[in-house]
Image (spheres, rainbow, N blue to C red):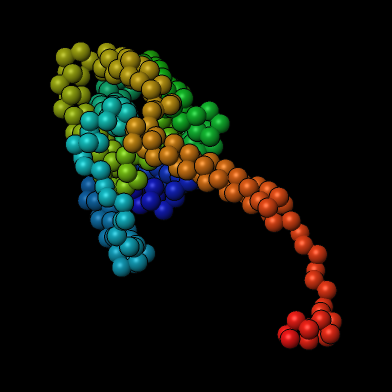
């Protein structure tokens, strides 16, 4: 994401490209989960891991071939320190949104297979196919997130995504069979598409207006927030699902998503740093003064030429007799 933010400096274009990049995650989920469950059940336990290892090696070789380090110059703008970024409340809100999203999805994905086996007697293939509606909706909404963010605003899309995610989690325990999960799964995929994709360009925009335009550190913080949510989700799900059950677990984390959703409103119009604001004002004043002084100089020059140096008639050529007398 840092590389995308560096290459695409226009904020609108950056949002569209990041939506496509996040759509790659959705595409991996769309293909990976059904394919993994099918191969695990039909081919063998080791087959999905062999396919993943092969794809990772091919992806690494492709990155080394295309993203050659010698072709990229070192960044001219110094990076903002991590502690400075972590003290920024708006960056913490954006990173916290990603952390809560990752936590909620991790809790759902680690607990719903056990619940489906107990209540629906679902097989491994059915569990994998149950993620298919979510992945399709996630993919489509991620690609369309650039257009939606331009029309509705990225912060409003994030707010709507948090609300829809909370509603989908609360509706999940109401399903009695695998077909009853289609609606909540589609709603969850829509919420992820309009939540994760707009937050990524918001983070880059926050760095632009509040810090230096170096994106490696801030997207590392975003990645750490996602990893922290994933790391906490599985122990929390294992501890709570045994004590309160799966339905109450979904109600709690759905309520957490709804409670955190109003924080996205603060990302609509984040204030800029005073230093950058002063620089922008200074540049505007310098441009205004320079244009005014140039216009004033042109007018003064014209007046001076008119009143102090009036136009003279062209001197007539001297007669040869006058020239001779003057010489004498």
* Residue at position x 38%, y 17% in the image: 262
**Is residue 288 toward the left or the right of residue 46 in the image?**
right
| Location of residue 320 with respect to 170 vertically, above or below | below
| Location of residue 327 with respect to 282 vertically, above or below | below
**Residue 231: image location, x then y, percent:** 19, 33
**Residue 305: image location, x then y, percent:** 68, 54
| Location of residue 8 with respect to 232 vertically, above or below | below
Which residue in the rendered view is the most extreme toward the front? 328
Work out whether residue 309 can be spotted: yes
Work out whether residue 27 can be spotted: no
Q: Examine the image and state in which quarter residue 89 appears.
A: top left
**Residue 206: image location, x then y, percent:** 36, 36
**Residue 43: image location, x then y, percent:** 29, 50
Nearer to the camera, 252 or 310:
310
* Residue at position x 77%, y 62% in the image: 312
- Number of marks in the rendered image: 0
**Is residue 108 toward the left or the right of residue 21 in the image?**
left
Nearer to the camera, 294 or 154:
294
* Residue at position x 39%, y 34% in the image: 277
* Residue at position x 34%, y 33% in the image: 273
Q: Examine the image and state in which quarter residue 74 appears.
A: bottom left
Give the position of the C terminus as an image quadrant. Answer: bottom right
**Is residue 232 toward the left or the right of residue 42 in the image?**
left
Nearer to the camera, 209 or 7:
209
């Amino acid at each position: 994401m840092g590389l995308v933010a560096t290459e695409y400096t226009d904020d609108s274009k950056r949002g569209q490209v990041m939506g496509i990049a996040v759509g790659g995650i959705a595409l991996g989920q769309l293909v990976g989960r059904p394919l993994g469950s099918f191969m695990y059940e039909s081919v063998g336990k080791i087959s999905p891991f062999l396919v993943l290892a092969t794809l990772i090696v091919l992806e690494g070789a492709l990155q080394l071939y295309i993203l050659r380090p010698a072709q990229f110059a070192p960044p001219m703008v110094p990076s903002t320190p991590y502690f400075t970024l972590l003290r920024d409340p708006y960056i913490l809100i954006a990173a916290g949104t990603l952390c809560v999203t990752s936590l909620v999805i991790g809790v759902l994905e680690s607990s719903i297979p056990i619940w489906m086996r107990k209540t629906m007697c679902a097989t491994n293939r059915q569990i994998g196919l149950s993620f298919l509606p979510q992945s399709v909706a996630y993919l489509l909404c991620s690609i369309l997130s650039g257009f939606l963010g331009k029309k509705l605003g990225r912060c409003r899309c994030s707010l709507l995504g948090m609300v829809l995610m909370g509603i989908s989690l609360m509706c999940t325990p109401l399903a009695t069979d695998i077909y009853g999960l289609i609606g909540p799964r589609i709603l969850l995929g829509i919420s992820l598409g309009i939540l994760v994709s707009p937050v990524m360009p918001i983070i880059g925009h926050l760095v632009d207006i509040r810090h230096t335009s170096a994106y490696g550190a801030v997207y590392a913080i975003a990645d750490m927030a996602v990893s922290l949510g994933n790391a906490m989700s599985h122990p929390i799900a294992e501890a709570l699902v045994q004590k309160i059950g799966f339905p109450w677990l979904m109600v709690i984390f759905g309520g957490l998503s709804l409670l955190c959703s109003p924080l996205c409103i603060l990302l609509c119009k984040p204030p800029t740093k005073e230093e950058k604001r002063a620089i922008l004002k200074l540049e505007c004043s310098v441009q205004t003064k320079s244009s005014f002084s140039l216009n004033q100089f042109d007018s003064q020059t014209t007046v001076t030429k008119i009143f102090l140096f009036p136009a003279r008639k062209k001197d007539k050529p001297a007669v040869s007799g006058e020239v001779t007398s003057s010489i004498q």
